[in-house]
Image (cartoon, grey):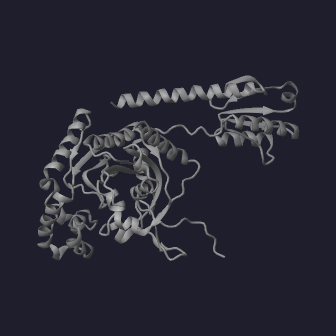
Amino acid sequence: MELITQAPRGTQDVLPQDSYRWQHIERTALSIARDFGFREIRTPVFEHTNLFQRSVGETTDVVQKEMYTFEDKGGRSITLRPEGTAGATRAVLEHGLLNGALPVKVSYVTSCYRYEKSQKGRYREFHQFGVECFGAAAPQADAETISLALLILKTLGLTGVSLHINSIGCPTCRARYHEALRGYFEERKGDLCETCLGRLERNPMRILDCKSPICGRIAADAPVMIQYLCDDCRDHFTAVKAHLDAAGLEYQLDEHIVRGLDYYTRTVFELVAENGLVLAGGGRYDGLVEEMSGMAQPGLGFAMGLERLLMVMEEQGCSFAEDTGCELYLVSMGAEAAQRCFTIATALREGGVSVECDIVGRSLKAQMKYADKLGARYTIVVGDNELETGVAQLKDMKTGAVEEVRLDDSLYTTLYNKSLDRQLAGVADLFQAVSEQG
């Protein structure tokens, strides 16, 4: 039988020595979102296929080319989620959250699936942090959502991130824009790819998002939506910019941003790293709730790709919250000492201390080597003398300092206080770093 020892193409494993970096990003994003009033939501990894067809859009690359779709055993068409907004919106509607106080604000860390070419920072299984806000039509909501995304990246230590914004209008003003686009692309249809020829009549804006280099060059000189905005959409966009200006949040007007999903309306934005990679993107989707339920309710949000974000953080040398790992390794000499170490470890673990002790029968020397490999912060050796006196030596493996400790409840207090001191120092360093950034 052939051994199965390789992950599917376009996926990756997050190994124990790397997972703390992901946890740092996720904790930071969820915590800051909570400060803005967003609460975590979790939705299924798969949904009915028509949810994405109706929300994401039949003419998008995601629906036409990239979704993982299959029939379940009941003959129902099911799709692994290609993005987070549709599922979150469905959950909010299904559970009647819009019947309560508005706005409804939700956040999530989720896995998504798209069948596309694997490349650096882009996988077929990828992960996003995202937020969705329902029931807020005012331009202040747009500015707040943008400021949330910026604050997350700033707190994570990223520098050189630029904010690009645009407005793609509403269905009223977009109808005139579609006609202008059709006229432009009709004159050049002979050079368009086959997919874009199909989009020409149904949704010419999707041609602007085509990944074909030829279509991209043609689209570069196409009419821009901002020239066709109705008075309401123009006033809304002006107010969004005024709020960003008032808060000192710098931005660039980017008339070519349309985003890749059909549900977007009015404000759209992207946060772009120095190397040109888009770290986060989002905007308004005021028609999505109505499209899914018949109930008119505005919405907006954004998503940031965690793989790409992690890659740029590493390139910039951003710091990550320390992976504390093993706080204490208990080294035992003999069967009675091993039992005592297990008893101590059990009590300390119940108090939230990370403790390990020998479970494979290593010698004293081998245990010390293993503790070093684990990166244990402290070690205690327990032998006959320590069992008799109830006193042992606590060794700091970083500094070599040794102090006498009792093998009783006071050991927990000692370790807790040492851990707390380091946490407080880490928080102080974080605040200082954020302060220095601006």
Rendered location of residue 388, percent (x, y):
88, 27
**160 in relation to 255, above or below:** above
Residue 221 shows in the view: no
Rendered location of residue 16, percent (x, y):
59, 49
* Figure quadrant of the N terminus: bottom right
Q: Write the residue at 75% across / 38% down.
A: 346
Query: As drawn, is 39 to the left or to the right of 346?
Result: left
- Asked whether 415 or 43 is in front, the reply is 43
Q: Write the residue at 49% across / 39% down.
A: 320
**14 in relation to 406, above or below:** below
Rendered location of residue 347, percent (x, y):
75, 35
Residue 88 shows in the view: yes
- Asked whether 418 or 46 is in front, the reply is 46
Q: Write the residue at 34% across / 47% down.
A: 135
- Asked whether 243 or 215 is in front, the reply is 243
* Figure quadrant of the C terminus: top left
Query: As drawn, is 301 to the left or to the right of 187?
Result: right
Rendered location of residue 236, percent (x, y):
20, 45
Counting every numbered tag in the picture gives 0
Q: In which quarter of the view is residue 422 placed?
A: top right
Q: Residue furthest top?
A: 404
**149 in relation to 412, above or below:** below
